[in-house]
Amino acid sequence: MTYDYAVIGGGIIGTAIFNKIIRKNKSCILIERELDIATGATKANSGLVHAGFDAETGSLKAKFNVRGNYLIEELAKELNIPFKRTGALVVGNDLEKLNNLKTRGENNGVKELEIINRDKLKELVPNLKEDIKYALYAKTAGVISPYIFAIALAEEGVINGGDFKLGFEITNIEEEKNIFKIYSKDNIIEAKKVINCAGAGFNEISKFLKVEEYPIKFRRGEYIVLDKSEFVKLSIFPLPTNLGKGILATPTIDGNILLGPTAEDIEDYNTETTTEGIDKILGYINSTFDNVPLNKTIRQFSGIRVSCGEDFVVEKSKKNQNVVLVAGINSPGLSSAPAIAEFVVEELFEEKAQDKIMKRRSPYFTENAGKIICRCEKIGENEIINAINAPIPAITVDAIKRRVRAGMGRCQGGQCMLEVCKLIARNKGLKLEDIKKESKNSYIMFKGEN
Amino acid sequence: MKTDVVVIGGGPSGMSAALKASEQGAKVLLVDVESRLGGILNQCIHNGFGLKHFKEELTGPEYANRLANEVYKDKNIEVKLNSYVNYIDKNKVFVLTEKGQEIIECSSIILSAGARERTSGEIYLKGKRLAGVYTAGTAQKMVNFYGKLPGKKIVILGSGDIGLIMARRMTLEGAEVKLVLEIMGHSSGLRRNIRQCIEDFNIPLLFNHTITKVVGDERVCGVYYAEVDENKKPKLETEKYIDCDCVLLSVGLIPENTLLPKQTLREKFVVVDDERQTSVDGIFICGNVLHIHDLADNATEEGEIAGKFAGLYALNKLKKYVKVIINFSNKISYCMPKLVNKKTEGKFTIYMRANNNFIKKFITVKSGDNIIAKKFCVGITTGEMQEIEVEYSKVNGDLYVDIEG
């Protein structure tokens, strides 16, 4: 069949656009190179829904962030996923800068911004150092799981008629009579219109499409994850610099604490953690907070933010009216995703029909948990099996981890990883040694000489 | 359901505790999350178990079976497998089974849930998050339960006992153990394991070294490693690279004691008395969930103590005494227990771990100015628990343990 639309890239942007297209009752396929969706920048960021005061007034970032922040609340309810308006604070002693941020926020259309003093600050963040006196308090900021958000958007799209291809590595794209033929090594997908939201792989896809390429840059951000704690109950930022919003401390929607990110410009896409990066986070956090529960450290990771200039690129290709380009989606990309999707589908592609009523997706959790497999996070066998057999099946260890949190706890899968492998193998008719951690060749076990 | 004693965790300490509690006349429920009793012993298919307790050399599963057979013969003990204890309240244990949640009322609780392994995240291991980096215990399970190898060219970080055992195990399975790195100047493992698992197989073991970065694309393909300075910081000028397809971590065990009520007194370890009762009345604790034992035999001994007194407690037969504190010198990293009931007859044992290696020294226990126990030791290492017996009747005020001579 020839799809009305093909979305290339299964990150938060791709899944949001895919979902929106399905709501317009058009046929659509979501194409992802990896074995699961949300494996790039979407899985490795702060998980924040920003209020929208950071971006320059009039920019796409400002516009989409404020609109996205508004849309997410309703969308999360529909998708049956947790979202919480925890609030955010930008802390510092430079009242003028804080006031400027507040004014910018108000100009961007952000509601409920307030400058607070030490008393209120102490009440909100008991662990903040005494010498920090003021903060901009943004009540509309919140936290969400970025990968659960993307997975739920994609699943709902699939339940309502959308198609998807995972592990689909595009080798070429041809256009014939206004139909795109998208090739992989052993498959062809046909579509009338294409959205390139391939993130770090944007230019590769643009080359195939013979449309605009952008000078894409990579910026690495390292994070430290702490086990569940009440250390901070809302997101705490320093005053922003030209490198970004700075190192923050935030709760995640699951109750963990995230410390980070650093901001380091790098040449190649590389998600390693470094001594310098981790020391930088620890140094900053220890200078800003008391009682940091570093004994609860369970993991560190790096995420890569792509950029192509100051602002997002969300536009129709000037070379091909049937292609939309979405590039350089760094922060606040997660917060903006629903608004970007709305803009792409309703404005750029002019799909003005009312959204159709979508069939709801069901959560993986079940009262009948079965045997507990992940002891740290108390995840039962049946919940894992539900994720394996979900509309977008979880067939890797990390895919399970993202969906149900088995392996996310303090033992980091030490106790449950092999049982998870066994469940995937059994339910998918695979051999144990074929089970992968995440990507195509990330075999958990030794698979033979090659 | 109602019982006298609930034992949480069916490894060597939990099974021993259940048996002893039953011996006092108590009705016991032994709960375990796995589908069979034995705990981690089941994956320890090597020998060296039981020399102390059974006076013969057994494998881990054999040791587990001996205890399990006794447990299953005991009419006072009911075993509940595939059951996960969700939380505990004073006299209630909330258990998740395949059928849902069950509440068990009891008079005393013994926590014997074991330990978990320290992870790469807890030691801030640098590099990418790749397939092929596992804790040694996970690898042991992979090899011994699932019959699969984690890799063929192995670098092991840490020389704890599981790491040493896995160095030998991987070698016997045809893998090449290229290097064992230990950040400390000495191993925290047993001397016999260094000899039988490392030296006998000519595996290089580097002290004062650690991994500086794990590299690879999807699976590990190598590590950078370097010597560390006195602050355990890598000296970058000594950094080298070695090819490998698997990194195993043996960097410590952490008691999995999150089930204990919040108000339970904790210092470096959960504070217990010589009867292994915690600061919360009726909750006892033993085995690796209390502190890390070198030998299953020691965990059994501790389980027997906890089981006996938890049984007596449940039957209202446990007497109350004044308690004294065990203090210790800076040559000792910790003593177990922390508190002693001032009884008038019988003996108790103080277990202790030195924080350095010593040759031909005395372990002494003082009460006031009097030495009330003294023991000569040819060699004391950080890797091996020492023990010394003390008579209750000689205890007169707080105790002080030291290494002298």
Image (spheres, coloured by chain):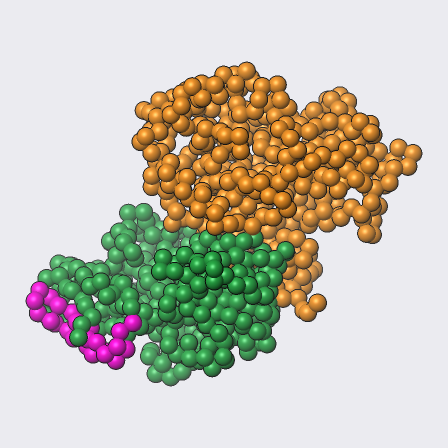
Chain colours: A orange, B green
Magenta-drawn stretch contains B353: no
Whether A241 is drawn above or below A97: the answer is below
Locate residue A230: give its quadrant: top left
Whether B370 is drawn above or below A439: the answer is below
Q: Nearer the viewer, residue A345 or B64?
A: A345
Whether A271 is drawn above or below B275: the answer is above
Considering the image in quadrants, where does the N terminus of chain B appear? bottom left
For the question of whether residue A32 can be seen, the reply is yes
Q: Main secondary structure of the magenta part?
A: strand
Locate residue A30: give its quadrant: top right
Q: Nearer the viewer, residue B314 or A221?
A: A221
Q: Residue farthest to the front?
A: B237
Locate residue A432: give its quadrant: bottom right
Q: Residue at x 91, y 37 (%)?
A: A176
Magenta-drawn stretch contains B360: yes
Q: Residue at x 50, y 54 (%)?
A: B126
Q: Nearer the viewer, residue B267 or B109?
A: B267
Q: Where in the figure is residue A158, as x and y percent of width and height? A: 72, 39
In the rendered structure, the answer to whether residue A184 lies left or right of residue A59 reads right
Q: Residue at x 86, y 40 (%)?
A: A174
Q: Residue farthest to the left?
A: B369
Q: Where in the figure is residue A3, as x and y percent of width and height? A: 82, 36
Q: The magenta stretch spans which residues?
A: B357-379
Considering the image in quadrants, where does the C terminus of chain B appear? bottom left
For the question of whether residue B44 can be seen, the reply is no
